[in-house]
Amino acid sequence: MLPRIDDDLGVERFADELLAKLETALPQPARSVRARRRPRLTIAGTAFVVLSLAALAGLGGLPLGGGGAPIGARPALATAAEVLLSTATAAQRERPLAAGEYLRVRLLRWGRGSDGRLHRILFTSWMAADGSARFLIEPDAGSGLARTDERCSPRNCLLRMAGQRPQPMGVARYGPGRGFTAAQLQRLPTGLVRLTAAIRARARTGTGLSSDPWELGFPLLVAPVPPDIRAAIYRCLAALPDVHRVGVERVGGHTGIALARRVRMPGATVERVIVVDPTTGALLAARATVNGRLTDKRVYAIRVVGSAALR
């Protein structure tokens, strides 16, 4: 059985409480499939209704076999820490989300099921700094999840699933364990020690690699955090031991640098690779292997949009 690494869905907004509600809302056959698959989407696991083939090709820039497409020459930056610190500098130059603006994140993700296959789920999230949001999930037929559409105000959310009555939810939360509310995201500390402690403390409210800030911190890079906090997350990752550079990779038309860290657990070695763009501060992709086998792969497409785009 593979270790449960992180079950936050989509842009890492779905915490354990929402996963439980999703499971109980599924018809009985789907629930049983989901229960059998938990060790698989367990390197973490909202989405989009329709994408053109061209858009899918753009999001699917990493081959299913593992990494992104290597493009040859070594980057000028000498160490993984320097890559992350340069990415932090670029992230800090971005302006904060204004009123009426949303961080739109499209995530194409593959997770390996108990049947041994990689199953695709397409997520799209629109997230405002005040907690207003929309989360869509569109899984493939074998994933064991149903299509959902959740809309949030700063005070609460309403979850809609096909064939089910709308379910009232609490405020949107992001990150490991029970997660942070959007308001809490705006107040995260920027000091490395305090930020690492905050991530670890929140992770202890869930399950998985709760002691590893590399695994639990990188999802916050695609949450609606202010630029100085996003930069601080990169600096936090740069300060961790044993982070090494994998190489230069091409993801959906963008060039990024892949960085990895291994975490050893009883009976398993987990390696999480993230691909970042030091020139823009963007997280382009992430993937994980357990005992050398690809278990989770994500490709991100991120932009800021106005409220008219939130359909």
Image (cartoon, rainbow, N blue to C red):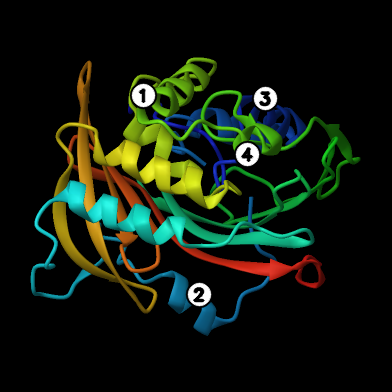
Residue designated by label 2: 56
Figure label count: 4
Q: Label 1 amino acid?
A: Val
Image quarter in which the C terminus is found: bottom right
Image height of 63 relative to 207, above or below? below
The residue at 63%/62% (across/down) is: 104
x, y (%) of residue 95? 57, 62
Mark 4 or 3: in front is 4
Density class for disc 1 (Cα within 10 Å; few <14, some 14-19, many ≥20) is: few
x, y (%) of residue 276? 32, 59
For residue 186, the mark is 4
Q: Residue furthest right?
A: 165
Q: Earlier in the sequence, mark 2 or mark 4?
A: 2
Q: Earlier in the sequence, mark 3 or mark 2?
A: 3
Image height of 79 relative to 50, above or below? above
Q: Label 2 amino acid?
A: Leu
Mark 1 or 3: in front is 1
For residue 193, the mark is 1
Which one is nearer the viewer's eye here, 6 or 218? 218
Report helix, strand or loop for mark 3. helix
x, y (%) of residue 253? 37, 79
Q: Label 3 amino acid?
A: Glu
Cβ–Cβ under 8 Å for marks 1 and 3: no
Which one is nearer the viewer's eye here, 158 or 116? 158
Cβ–Cβ under 8 Å for marks 3 and 2: no
Density class for disc 3 (Cα within 10 Å; few <14, some 14-19, many ≥20) is: few
Q: CA distance from mark 4 to mark 3?
A: 22 Å
Q: Earlier in the sequence, mark 1 or mark 3?
A: 3
Q: CA distance from mark 2 to mark 4?
A: 32 Å
Q: CA distance from mark 2 to mark 1?
A: 39 Å
